[in-house]
Amino acid sequence: ERDVGSGRGPAGAAGASRRAARGASGPSWQPRTESNTIDLRGMRADDALGELEKALDRLYRTEAGTAYVIHGHGTGAVRRAVRERLAKHPLVAEWRPGEPEEGGDGVTAAILR
């Protein structure tokens, strides 16, 4: 089973994520667009987290619903930093790794509150 996260962290949220993805109660996953995509490729973790904060704030204010964070594969440092931040972020209801067609583990998707 995939490692799926919520605002409480990745453990035990797979069922909630599947319900949200199907559009049951709560928010649903919106399709990826240029406007809801945050591209952090090539950045160091500290710089990437600063950009992530600004972009999440912008997406929340515009009621984007879903954010797609492209961090790439690389060493995994940015991916880990992004997922740790999303797991505790007050604007994030839940998160999950990208699906294969979204970029796989080089992408993290988040539903905003």
Image (spheres, rainbow, N blue to C red):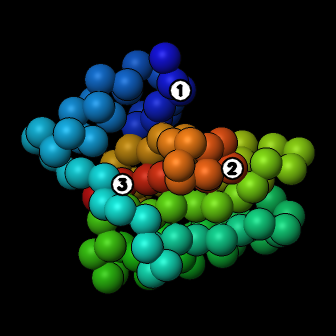
* Residue at 64% in and 61% down: 70
Residue type at tag 3? Ile
Describe the element under mark 1 as helix, strand or loop.
Answer: loop
* Residue at 89% in and 45% down: 75
Please indicate whether residue 74 sits to the left or right of residue 83 in the image: right
Residue type at tag 2? Gly
Please indicate whether residue 88 sits to the left or right of residue 44 in the image: left
Q: Which residue is mark 3?
A: 111
Q: Is residue 25 visible?
A: yes
Q: Is residue 81 visible?
A: no
The spot of residue 106 in percent (x, y) is 68, 50
> How far apart, in angstroms, are the residues tagged by discs 1 and 2?
14 Å
Q: Nearer the viewer, mark 3 or mark 2?
A: 2
Q: Which mark is residue 3?
A: 1
Residue 90 vertical placement versus 38 (above, below): above
Few, some or many C-alpha atoms within 10 Å of disc 1 (few <14, some 14-19, many ≥20)? few
* Residue at 56% in and 42% down: 100
Few, some or many C-alpha atoms within 10 Å of disc 3 (few <14, some 14-19, many ≥20)? many
Residue 56 vertical placement versus 14 (above, below): below
